[in-house]
């Protein structure tokens, strides 16, 4: 594959926001270090960033500067909301932060027309092209490991966008854990600061390379999105059916039984849906609820992030088994 960056070898305090208008979520200022790129490396990074944000084409971007081993006085993530021009003005500062150990990530702000497929092999990229899923943007995040951004013909809702990302990851062997509507991808031109990629001999880290920036909507977009939407609609119908079924299960539950919403509102679970489902299932079974009733309650929330219908069924069954095992151990 031709690399466009061949000369490259391989939550903190927020700044002020614009308060009105379509760009009201954007940080006002660029981060200058210094004002303009002054070294050849800065220029190479600037060109890679310029091409990536141009192809992604969002009005606003979220840029995240992540450092896993941040100290007690440091933020693990430094977030910024910038337009493309402000990102470019901030390239020297971003390089400074990257040299200090931070990984540089980017995603569109709000709903958008892109899907990120993470953790791809070169063979997967070739398969995507051969089947009409040509990526608008390909980034090599570490040696022989790629992220691909596909551009749809329209902006997608959060639900459809997540379903599309998961379907693409499943089809081409990408990371399903990274497949949702607003997952961060790496910004090209900076180094991947994960410790496992550090060269023991030189102490250097590999650069995140911009491999392709062709842009454009992939040929199979219309057909693919039509199928994704059908599946989303079917899942919505199934959830409604289960809710209706659950509403008829009144006699199965004692009147004093707590609702799952009580668990969802409990801060001790931190909004973690998996923990909430398990805690509710343990509670409900302990108070005489039926297996069918508990399964219906768990399915009352959107489980599409778990994958297709088979994977959702497997998740519900695992949760029920864990709950019953927990009760048995406590006897």
Image (tube, rainbow, N blue to C red):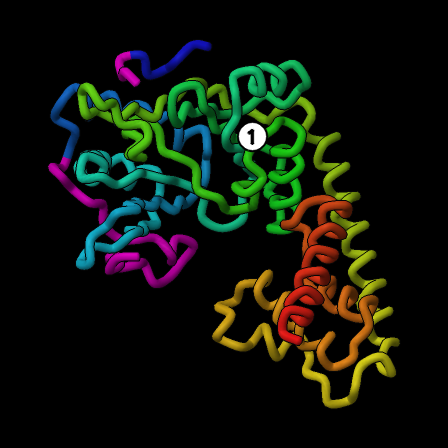
Q: Which residue is mark 1?
A: 150
186 vs 189: above or below: below
Q: Residue furthest bottom?
A: 256
Q: Looking at the picture, tell me which residue is in the foreground, 240 or 42.
A: 240
Image point (27%, 35%), residue name? 88
Q: Residues within 10 Å of mark 1 (few under 14, many from 20)?
A: many
Whether residue 210 is visible: yes
149 vs 282: above or below: above
Image point (23%, 50%), residue name? 70
Image point (63%, 23%), residue name? 133
Q: Which residues are magenta?
A: 7-35
Q: Residue furthest top?
A: 2
Q: Quadrant of residue 221?
A: top right
Residue 9 among those drawn in magenta = yes
Residue 110 x %, y %: 49, 50
User: Image check: 68 left or right of 122?
Assistant: left
Q: Looking at the picture, tell me which residue is in the foreground, 91 or 275.
A: 275
Q: How many marks?
A: 1
Q: Secondary structure at mark 1?
A: strand
Q: Looking at the picture, tell me which residue is in the foreground, 305 or 85.
A: 305
Image point (65%, 72%), residue name? 280
Residue 196 x %, y %: 32, 31
User: Image check: 239 left or right of 221?
Assistant: right
Whether residue 281 is visible: no
135 vs 277: above or below: above
Residue 36 x %, y %: 15, 32
Residue 212 among those drawn in magenta = no
User: Image check: 151 left or right of 167?
Assistant: left
């Amino acid at each position: 594959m031709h690399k466009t960056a061949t000369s490259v070898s391989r939550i903190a305090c927020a700044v002020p926001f614009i308060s009105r208008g379509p760009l009201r979520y954007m940080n006002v200022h660029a981060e200058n270090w210094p004002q303009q790129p002054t070294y050849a490396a800065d220029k190479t990074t600037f060109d890679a960033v310029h091409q990536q944000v141009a192809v992604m084409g969002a009005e606003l971007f979220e840029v995240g500067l992540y450092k896993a081993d941040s100290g007690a006085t440091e933020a693990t993530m430094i977030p910024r909301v910038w337009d493309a021009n402000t990102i470019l003005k901030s390239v020297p500062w971003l390089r400074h932060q990257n040299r200090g150990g931070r990984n540089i990530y980017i995603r569109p702000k709000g709903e958008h027309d892109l899907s990120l497929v993470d953790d791809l092999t070169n063979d997967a990229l070739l398969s995507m092209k051969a089947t009409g899923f040509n990526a608008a943007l390909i980034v090599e995040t570490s040696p022989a490991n790629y992220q691909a951004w596909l551009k749809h013909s329209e902006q997608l809702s959060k639900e459809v966008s997540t379903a599309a990302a998961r379907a693409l990851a499943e089809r081409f062997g990408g990371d399903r854990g990274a497949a949702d509507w607003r997952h961060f991808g790496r910004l090209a031109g900076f180094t991947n600061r994960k410790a496992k990629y550090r060269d023991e001999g030189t102490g250097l880290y590999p650069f995140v390379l911009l491999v392709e920036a062709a842009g454009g909507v992939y040929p199979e977009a219309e057909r693919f999105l039509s199928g994704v939407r059908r599946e989303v609609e079917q899942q919505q119908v199934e959830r409604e059916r289960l809710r209706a079924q659950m509403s008829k299960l009144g006699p199965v539950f004692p009147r004093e039984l707590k609702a799952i919403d009580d668990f969802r509102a409990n801060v001790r679970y931190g909004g973690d849906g998996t923990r909430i489902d398990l805690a509710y299932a343990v509670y409900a079974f302990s108070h005489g609820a039926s297996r069918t009733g508990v399964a219906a309650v768990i399915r009352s929330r959107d489980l599409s992030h778990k994958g297709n219908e088979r994977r959702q069924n497997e998740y519900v069954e695992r949760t029920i088994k864990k709950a019953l095992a927990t009760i048995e151990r406590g006897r």
